[in-house]
Image (cartoon, rainbow, N blue to C red):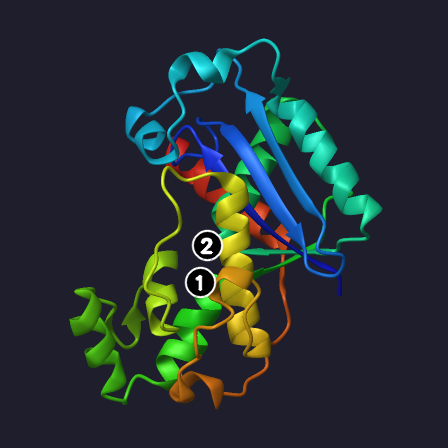
């Protein structure tokens, strides 16, 4: 399975109303990177709080020299085809996938031919890694050290930044958030979980804690993107009734 790890910066949280500002991706086989920013159309809703996170200004979103969302989506789809990518991953990647679907839907672009499968790194860490160490005092130690909370099993919840702390990485994703950085840091976590090694050279000298390096589990089968899309569409229809 050929995997690309992605991240999107958006104008809000609703894939059916908001749009994509930028898209970043890493092909973990070739290490090739994809990054493009795009122009959003006038019918896309813009949430000021989202712009505070990604640092874009409203006027930047309308720049005519930028490609449209639809053009960026087509570029990304072509990039995936070039690298034979058939699975997508990322941190809370269902959010990113649905936004890409929203772009295709809004611009009447055929979504078929998009990679068929996905793995969610956030879910893998919460449901496998964090649950496996849930009875160890190290969880409380890490939470105290960094003044964070992850909840209690089975209702655990972590952000990308919190996940890094469990691997001794005393650093957050750079701010303001840029899609390529999100993809790179998600790739770092994927490598830490999957291969027990670092992806980003900047962390090469950070030792991986013993309580995580000894864990061994299978990611299991990937989820189907068409099932995610159908489920999200059904929820949207029910909300509109």
Quarter of the figure with the C terminus: top left
Tell me the residue at 38%/65% (across/down).
164
Q: Is residue 129 left or right of residue 110?
A: left
Q: Do the CB atoms of the residues marked 2 and 1 lie less than 8 Å apart? A: yes
Q: Which residue carries the number 1 mark?
A: 122
- Residue 143 x, y percent position in the rendering: 21, 72
- Give whichever of 241, 33 is nearer the camera: 33
Q: Is residue 65 above or below residue 233?
A: above
Label 1 sits on a secondary structure element that is helix
Q: Is residue 44 above or below residue 230?
A: above
Q: Is residue 137 left or right of residue 4?
A: left
Q: Which residue carries the number 2 mark?
A: 92
Q: Is residue 2 left or right of residue 230?
A: right
**Quarter holding residue 177:** top left
- Give whichever of 121, 108 is nearer the camera: 121
- Residue 118 x, y percent position in the rendering: 62, 58
- Give whichever of 137, 46 is nearer the camera: 137
- Residue 146 x, y percent position in the rendering: 21, 66
**Quarter holding residue 58:** top left
- Residue 130 x, y percent position in the rendering: 36, 77
Quarter of the figure with the N terminus: bottom right
Spatial CA span between label 2 and label 1 = 5 Å
Q: Is residue 129 left or right of residue 156?
A: right
Q: Is residue 8 above or below residue 52?
A: below
Tell me the residue at 20%/79% (across/down).
140
Label 2 sits on a secondary structure element that is loop
- Give whichever of 50, 209 is nearer the camera: 209
> Can residue 159 be seen at all in this image of the molecule?
no
């Amino acid at each position: 399975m050929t995997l690309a790890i992605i991240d999107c910066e958006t104008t809000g949280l609703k894939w059916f109303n908001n749009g994509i500002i930028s898209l970043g991706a890493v092909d973990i086989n070739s290490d090739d990177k994809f990054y493009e920013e795009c122009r959003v159309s006038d019918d896309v809703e813009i949430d000021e709080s989202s712009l505070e996170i990604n640092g874009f200004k409203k006027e930047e979103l309308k720049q005519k020299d930028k490609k449209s969302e639809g053009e960026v989506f087509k570029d990304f789809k072509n990039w995936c085809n070039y690298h034979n990518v058939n699975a997508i991953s990322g941190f809370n990647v269902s959010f990113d996938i649905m936004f890409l679907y929203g772009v295709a839907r809004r611009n009447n672009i055929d979504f078929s031919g998009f990679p068929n499968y996905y793995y969610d790194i956030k879910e893998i860490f919460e449901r496998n890694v964090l649950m496996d160490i849930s009875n160890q005092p190290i969880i409380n130690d890490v939470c105290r050290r960094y003044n964070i909370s992850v909840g209690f099993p089975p209702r655990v919840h972590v952000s990308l930044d919190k996940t890094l702390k469990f691997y001794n990485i005393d650093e957050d994703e750079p701010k303001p958030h840029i899609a390529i950085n999100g993809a790179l840091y998600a790739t770092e976590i994927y490598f830490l979980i999957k291969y027990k090694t670092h992806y980003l050279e900047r962390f090469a000298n950070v030792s991986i804690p013993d309580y995580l390096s000894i864990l061994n589990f299978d990611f299991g089968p990937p989820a189907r993107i068409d099932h995610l899309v159908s489920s999200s569409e059904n929820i949207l229809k029910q909300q509109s009734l």
